[in-house]
Image (cartoon, grey):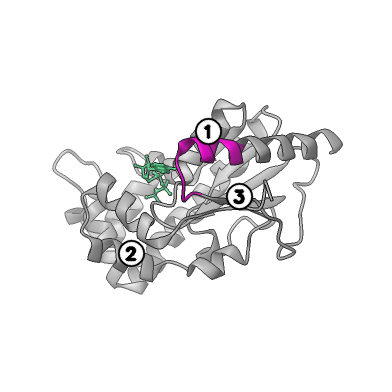
Amino acid sequence: MADARISDSAGVASKRLPGSARPVVGVTGGIGSGKSTVAGLFQELGAGIVDTDAIARELTLPGQPALRRIAERFGTEYLDTDGTLNRAKLRRLVFVEPGARNDLEAILHPLIGDQVRKRVQACDAPYVLVLIPLLAETGAYRDLLRRVLVVDCDEQLQVQRTMERSGLSADEVRAIMAAQASRSARLALADDIIVNDGGLAELNRQVAILDARYRELASVG
Ligand code: ATP
């Protein structure tokens, strides 16, 4: 079957952004599954992209209120000498201390949420993809999303691609994967699935099919 790799799931009730017919699609997937690559391909086809990781980085630049609050809570030892956030150090802390993770999320999530909603509203593309790596873990943005697209990938490939890109060891990548939602928990949220186990041509093919589907949704309102 030609399109067996893109499937529908009955899992999630579709919800609409009040007052807007533009489809908003949450994109999630495990570390190194290919979320950014997929988003780039959709963007080339004209999709609007809102990236929660990019927003988090912007909100924690020097001079931003979130960075001041992080320094107040965690100490200035989490800032580098030039005043920028030492992301690697903070990431290591929240990885081992759930309380620290909760506090960091309490500082960042409301601010990220405000920005996501503003950027979705301001976007004039036919449909918008919101990249939310931890959607399955947090359950965030369900009121905003019409559909959920999961980028799925063989776990061995995930490890390999993440190692190549990040320089982390296989054990380090596996530890991050173990702390993330399971592949099946993520897939249970999916309205649409992209299987990123092949090359870029295959990925492009799947993206083109979904682009047509989302444009169709946009046109029927
Ligand atoms: P993260 O969760 O770490 O932000 P991600 O899910 O956004 O990662 P990408 O950054 O898109 O994943 O992909 C991880 C790496 O794998 C990148 O180096 C990317 O170029 C590569 N990659 C992704 N998909 C493919 C593919 N189909 N073929 C070859 N390489 C790929």
Query: At which x and y percent is residue 97?
Result: 30, 72
Which kind of residue does numbered mark 3 sit on? Gly
**Which residue is labeled 2 in the image?**
176
Quarter of the image for residue 130 reads top right
Residue at 22% over, 55% down: 168
Give yes or no for residue 170 being in the magenta stretch.
no
Residue at 39% over, 51% down: 32
**Magenta stretch in the rendered image:** 196-207
Secondary structure beneath label 3: strand
Q: Is residue 63 left or right of residue 35?
A: left
Query: At which x and y percent is residue 51?
Result: 50, 41
Pointer 3 or 2: first along the chain: 3
Q: In the rendered image, is residue 215 in sight?
A: yes
Q: For the stretch drawn in magenta, what is the main secondary structure?
A: helix
Q: In the rendered image, is residue 118 in sight?
A: no
Secondary structure beneath label 1: helix
**Which residue is labeled 1 in the image?**
41
Residue at 61% over, 49% down: 26
Q: Is residue 128 above or below residue 7?
A: above
Which kind of residue does numbered mark 2 sit on? Ile
Which callout, 3 or 1, points to the residue nearer the camera?
1
State which image quarter holds ligand 1: top left
User: Ligand 1 closer than 8 Å to the CB at disc 2?
Assistant: no
Q: Is residue 114 above or below residue 78?
A: above
**Which residue is labeled 3 in the image?**
26
Q: Which mark is residue 4?
A: none
Query: At which x and y percent is residue 2?
Result: 67, 46
